[in-house]
Image (tube, rainbow, N blue to C red):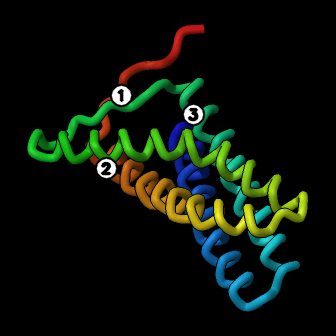
Amino acid sequence: MKDVLGLLAVWSIVLSGLTLVGGVVLIKRGERVWHHRAMLTATSLAALFLVFYLAKWALYGTTAYGGPEAWRLAYYALLFTHTLLAALNGPLALYVIWRALRGEFAFHKRWAKVLVPIWLYVAVSGWIIYLVLKRYGVESGTIAF
């Protein structure tokens, strides 16, 4: 079950990033309705990621890096920036969606230009972290309730 939750989490965030890119392409083509649908789908997939990730964390605990010492600093730098930007991504996405729903498209567009690169970085770095821990992860134990 742990592996299933991990795969569901990583695929939902990757699909979220791909759908986000599709939404950007759609708005550049002037297809506002499909852009709206794509962005809400991307947001829903990101929310699913959070559910899967938190379920895995709650049930199985964390996985520590146990790979080559030469990669340790790079891994933790990636993990730190990923975590920081992931924490920023959620509230920023909600703000951007809120501005769009209010019809404040100038604010929406301005902040979406900040959000999209952050979201894509989080999606790609999450995939890299998943692959690294899949290969070099060391079980840290479960959470005690």
Q: Say which quarter of the image contains residue 114.
A: bottom right
Q: Amino acid at mark 2?
A: Val
The answer to whether the residue labelled 3 contacts the one labelled 1, judged by CB atoms less than 8 Å apart, is: no
Residue 86, percent from left and from top:
53, 45
Q: Which residue is mark 3?
A: 56
Mark 2 and mark 3 lie on one chain; the one further toward the N terminus is 3
Residue 71 left/right relative to 38: left
Which quarter of the rendering shows the C terminus? Answer: top right
Label 2: how many Cα within 10 Å (few below 14, some 14–19, many 20+): some
The residue depicted at 38 percent of the width and 32 percent of the height is: 63
The residue depicted at 45 percent of the width and 52 percent of the height is: 126
The residue depicted at 72 percent of the width and 84 percent of the height is: 26
Quick one: SS at disc 2? helix
Outermost residue toward the bottom in this view: 29
Q: Amino acid at mark 3?
A: Lys
Q: Nearer the viewer, residue 139 or 96?
A: 96
Residue 65, percent from left and from top:
27, 36
Q: Amino acid at mark 1?
A: Glu
Q: Cα distance, mark 1 to mark 2?
A: 13 Å
Quick one: SS at disc 3? helix
Residue 21, percent from left and from top:
61, 75
